Amino acid sequence: MAISPDAPPAAPAEKPAHGSPCPRCRAALTDDPRFIAWCPACDWNLAPGEEAAPVPTRRQRAAAARTDRLFEEQAAGGDSPTARLDWLLASAAAGVIHLVTVGMFCLALWLLIAGTVVQRCIGAVVLVIAVTLRPRLGRLPRDENVLDRAGAPALYGLADKVAAEVGARPVDVIQVTDEFNASYGLVGLRRRSVLRLGLPLWEVLDERQRIALLGHEFGHHVNGDRRRSFWLHSAVSALWAWYDMARPDKPRHGWRQDELTLLVRLGAALGRPVLRAIAWLLFQGLVLFDRLTSRAGQQAEYHADTLAVRAGGSEAARGMLAALLLGSAVDTAVGRVRAEERGRPRVVRARNRRSEDAPAPPAPDLLWERVREHLASVPAVERERLRRLSARDRSAVDGSHPPTHLRIALADRCGARPAAVAATAAEAAAVAAELAPHRARIAAELLAG
């Protein structure tokens, strides 16, 4: 709700009392003492510590206007010609980057083969730089968080059902993480698919919402998101490598120590001012790529959300998207359980377990139970505060996604649709059993953190 310019200024200082009159409009503040006291009538204290909402810059206002126009285009069922034009420009820029990388490699080979001794030394340096600047295409994960098809047939079976429904091919690898998120990507020259499921998010969703989540993630394989194509992804990866090389004092993306040492020496030889100027130009190139691909990328995200509605149903898809706003609530629940576990004497816990007929749940199981209980207790008015805060700050899962409140709004406009995929109680139990060791390990890691 817009704030009247004639409204009295907010009273600072004292902590607002739950249920008391709003110092700005005199309406009643929210009255749940477990959560922030704020005013649903005028948004006072929507973000604690702020006397007024931050004033967006001109660039932020222009970006918000573009995002809103794209939302209206998607809600109307139309396409975005601007997004198509931006993609063509981004593809042309990617071609320039690939030509530079290939050109450096060819120059290095020519100097090594046909050059003098000095030229061969230069060619060797250029070859090292060309190899260092090669696009990073990623690789299949091979750690303890990876589930294979033999060890998790029920989870892969559910994933395959959802993939078939949205028109995607079966996933190659499923990996669980400790993040409140999920992602889908293609790695390596063979573009193998990797589905990453953050267990903190997975655990707070119900069975239908999990299917909607899978529908969204598999939707990335069929939604025309050209940012994930080999051509654009490898070009952006190479540009990031160039940028990292121009900033040897601030390495990124996991440089190896031998590469870092070489780049530091090169940076010292060329001079930091020159490298900073080059880094600035390269960063502008990254900003340009983001600008050229953001509309098409957001359009693809909306498409993935409609596939989430198709797979899990409109109600489940909306619930899944709304859960993305509760990351801070999950952090709060984890912090509380961690503090309780650290403050509880071990000998008391052991004595209590012996004295009770039924053993107390171990800390990992307790963590997920408490997280679900905490999120279930979040009242509607607090969820509304988070939604309004998302709308005000244009917040999203990350920079590649549309603002979460617009994604929820688009799911609402899809109308009531039934789920195309469902999991039986036996299938859900089998998936839970397959994830049990990973749930315990990741919960222990979160509690130890």
Image: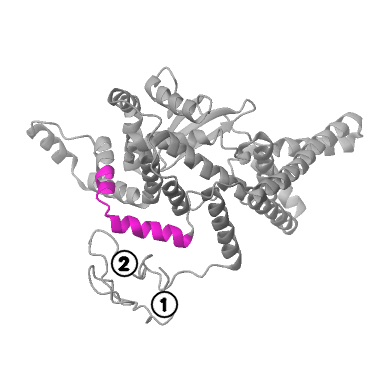
Q: Position of residue 48 (x, y in %)?
A: 36, 66
Residue nearer the viewer, 342 or 333: 333
Image: 417 above or below 379: above
Q: Position of residue 319 (x, y in %)?
A: 36, 44
Q: What's the magenta region? A: 371-393
Q: Position of residue 409 (x, y in %)?
A: 44, 52
Question: Taken as a whole, is the magenta stretch helix, strand or loop?
Answer: helix
The numbered dot on residue 4 is 1
Q: Is residue 277 left or right of residue 251?
A: right
Q: Is residue 88 left or right of residue 372?
A: right
Q: Position of residue 436 (x, y in %)?
A: 31, 28
Mark nearer the viewer, 1 or 2: 1
Image: 392 above or below 360: below
Residue 273 lies in the magenta-colored region: no
Quadrant in which the C terminus is drawn: top left
Q: Secondary structure at mark 2?
A: loop
Q: Going 73% across and 58% down the picture, which residue do you hit? A: 277
Q: Is residue 197 visible?
A: no
Q: Secondary structure at mark 1?
A: loop
Say whether disc 1 or disc 2 marks the residue closer to the N-terminus.
1
Residue at label 2?
A: 38
